[in-house]
Image: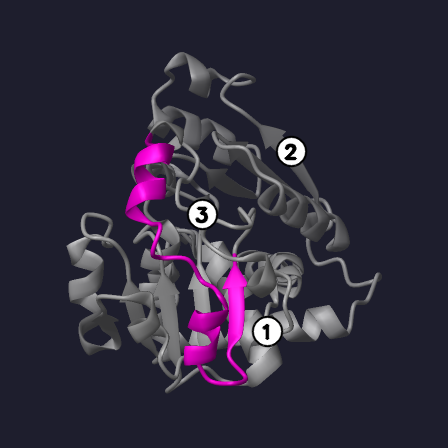
Amino acid sequence: MNPRHFTSLLDLSSEEFHFIINRAIELKNNRDPDYQPLKGRLLAMIFEKSSTRTRISFETGMAHFGGNATFLSPRDTQLGRGEPLQDSAKVISSMVDCIMLRTDKHETVTTFALHSSVPVINGLTDQEHPCQLLADMLTYFECRGDIKGKTVAWIGDGNNMCQSYIHAAMLLDFTLNIACPNGYEPHPEYVKAAGERVRFFNSPLEAAQNADLCVTDVWASMGQEEEKKQREIAFKDYQINAAIMKAAHNDALFMHCLPAHRGEEVTVEVLDGPQSVIFAEAENRLHAQKALLEFLLCRK
């Protein structure tokens, strides 16, 4: 039987997305140290990009479930010496039970999935960050209930996070308002697939009007350091501040996948304010990924 992969949110149906969210809430609220469904199983974690939340949450999740995780970087493996991805995928998957990759090119993850005999998880690529969306949506459901019919304002770069938010809007049936500078929009194919669920606005204030959730990300992601000055100029009017949050609903939440640059994409007032749920959101990486691992490895 072919393994079940999680390279994109669209690898899930709407029902499965809801199932993982609800299961994550159960696991979070009822941790049983004796429940070890992954005892004796191993997760290989391949990192081409640095990480805090992704690495800790997957390692801890495997430990909670009685399994183990091993950290691999290109410096430590033949991946860094040019071994073909398909060969690495076949070899690594023959020795482990699941593979998680945090990498630059989305193609790396999809190629691994094509040639792996075990489930492959996208821990982040240049195009998508689906694991973060599991945590974000889990956090919203915990705080406000179902997001169906709600409005989310994405303000900033049309990056991998924005594109995964587009997928979430498609699966969970909410509206995504996007405000980003010219030239920094999400890829057209993502927008086209979402249809009327995605709307573009000329200013952050317009995008945030009556929103239930406001979200942003850093202006320059990993690998874009050389563009930092250019991006600071392009994004200077795309900061989430008190005025933006005031335009949203009174009970709107603020999220950021972290790490954040206080005073750039978001003010200190908002990031550390009462509407911010960034630390619950970060912790929920653990619970969402435990539910995901269980879903991929334990379901018949």
Q: Read off the residue under disc 2.
A: 70
Numbered mark located on residue 255 in the image: none
Q: Nearer the viewer, mark 2 or mark 3?
A: 3
Judge the density around disc 2: few (<14), some (14-19), many (≥20) Cα neighbours within 10 Å: few
Q: In this view, does 33 lie to the left or right of 128?
A: right
Q: Is residue 299 magenta?
A: no
Callouts 2 and 3 close, C-beta under 8 Å: no
Q: What stretch is highlighted in magenta?
A: 227-256
Above or below for 37 versus 74: below
Q: Does the magenta stretch include residue 246?
A: yes
- Where residue 97 sits in the image (x, y, percent)? 57, 43
Judge the density around disc 3: few (<14), some (14-19), many (≥20) Cα neighbours within 10 Å: many
**What amino acid is found at the position of numbered circle 2 in the picture?**
Thr
Q: Nearer the viewer, mark 2 or mark 1?
A: 1
* Precedes in sequence: disc 1 or disc 3: 3
Above or below for 231 versus 213: above
Q: Read off the residue under disc 1.
A: 275
Callouts 1 and 3 close, C-beta under 8 Å: no
**Front residue (pair 142, 217):** 217
Q: Read off the residue under disc 3.
A: 218
Distance of mark 2 from mark 1, alpha carbons? 37 Å
